Image (cartoon, rainbow, N blue to C red):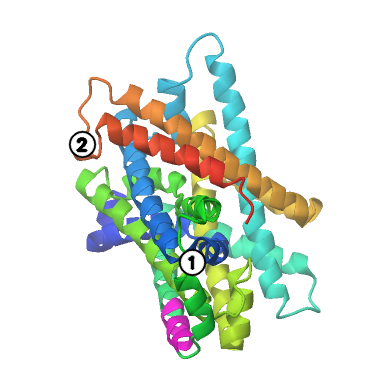
Amino acid sequence: MTVRTRMGRNSTFSAAAIVAGNGIGSGVMAIPYFVSKAGIAGGILAFLFAYMVSVLLHLMIAQILLHTGDTADILRAFHIYLFKGRFRNVLKIAFFVILVIVLETNLAAYISGAAEIVSTLFPAVPVFFFQIGFYILAAVIVVLGLHAICISEKVTVSVMGGILLIALIFSFLHINPVAAGTFLRTGVFSCLMPFLAAYSMIMFSFSAIFAVPQVIEVLDRDEKKIRKAIFAGLLMNLIISVIVTVCTILTSAEVTKVAVVGWAKAVGGIIQILGSVFILLAMFTSYWSIGFATTKIITNQTKWSFGLSFALATVPALVITFVIPGGFMEYMKIAGGAVAVIISLMLIPTYLICTRDKEVTMLHRAERSKITVLAVFLMYLVMAVGSFITV
């Protein structure tokens, strides 16, 4: 029985929720600060460019994986189409090791971040209890498989939407006219550097590269539904990010680098609670998708059992939270962002090689033109540049 049969008519929404859950994370709380520096025009352009470029790249990933095979993952696609010559296997192994290390460090960051949030409510309890608790609750969904992840992502993303709706209502009751006026008067062309920084941060928050193989499996390779799920999942990310940004900027006397701090100070403690719950749920959704993706990558590359691959994918991440300081893990998260940029840039040549003399069905004519593909590549270079800008 396929995953699609089990999921029934809600399968497309479930797949879209996987994309949204993989992409949206605690990083969404950093977006308002950068957008506040870019101004309203810069913010709108940054969101629009990030959404369009992200959709195109994720559709390209889907096309690559559909051409590659039933059990394809991104690393296997690189091995088939990109890694050539005498060092082919060396490149494959090296990239596999680097990718797994970075993904496991991301999982460790989710564990540590979630534990820190909960520990503020129970300061007398040692943090490692919350680290273990989060790991158990998150990892059990991963080990149950993609069907459990579909249900969990769908429910959790829906709850996150409800939380944001409540936060939106409270925020409109506490609009700061001075802050809103200042933001509306800020233009994009006089603030190019903040615009690039905002665009880069939004692109990072929209990245759901490792969710695409899961979407293909959930939808049983139905191309029309895969396309809809990618558009819808990234649209969910766009809506969530815009709501957080608008609420923060229109209420905060000072837009802080972690949005929920200034937002809560302006609106009240309810936002601190809602924001903390929202971030905690975002960490669960990201953990499920990344944890499953890491497990599948290990399984595909080593041919080991799912259970052993699951243990190798998740247990080291828990151990990392016990032995490595949080500051080091923050640097590793930055490294993870750099790897995401590298993967994105590698995907363009992989796409061109993969689709040579083959039918492209995931993208419409204008979307698959050479000009569009080049534009996507260049916009990812812009993303890389923007990640080094400090505002």
Q: Is residue 272 visible?
A: no
Instruction: Name the image quarter holding residue 242.
Output: bottom left
Residue 119 in the image, given as x and y percentages of width and height = 72, 74
Q: Amino acid at mark 1?
A: Thr
Q: Is residue 83 visible?
A: yes
Residue for point 58% across, 47% down: 387
Identify the amino acid type marked 2.
Thr
**Quadrant of the frame with the C terminus:** bottom right
Instruction: Give the residue pinned by disc 2.
Output: 361
Which segment did they paint magenta?
164-172
- Residue 171 drawn above or below residue 27: below
Q: Which residue is mark 1?
A: 186
Which residue occupies the foreground of this view, 166 or 290?
A: 166
Position in image of residue 97 (x %, y %) = 62, 32
Left or right, 389 with respect to 372, comes to right
Secondary structure category for the residue under label 1: loop
Residue 25, relative to residue 182: is it above or below? above
Question: Which residue is painted at 72% across and 77% down in the image?
Answer: 120
The residue at 54%/23% (across/down) is: 92
Q: Mark 2 or mark 1, which has the lower sequence index?
A: 1
**In x, y percent, where is residue 294?**
54, 43
Give the distance between the C-alpha atoms of the residues marked 2 and 1, in whole angstroms: 42 Å
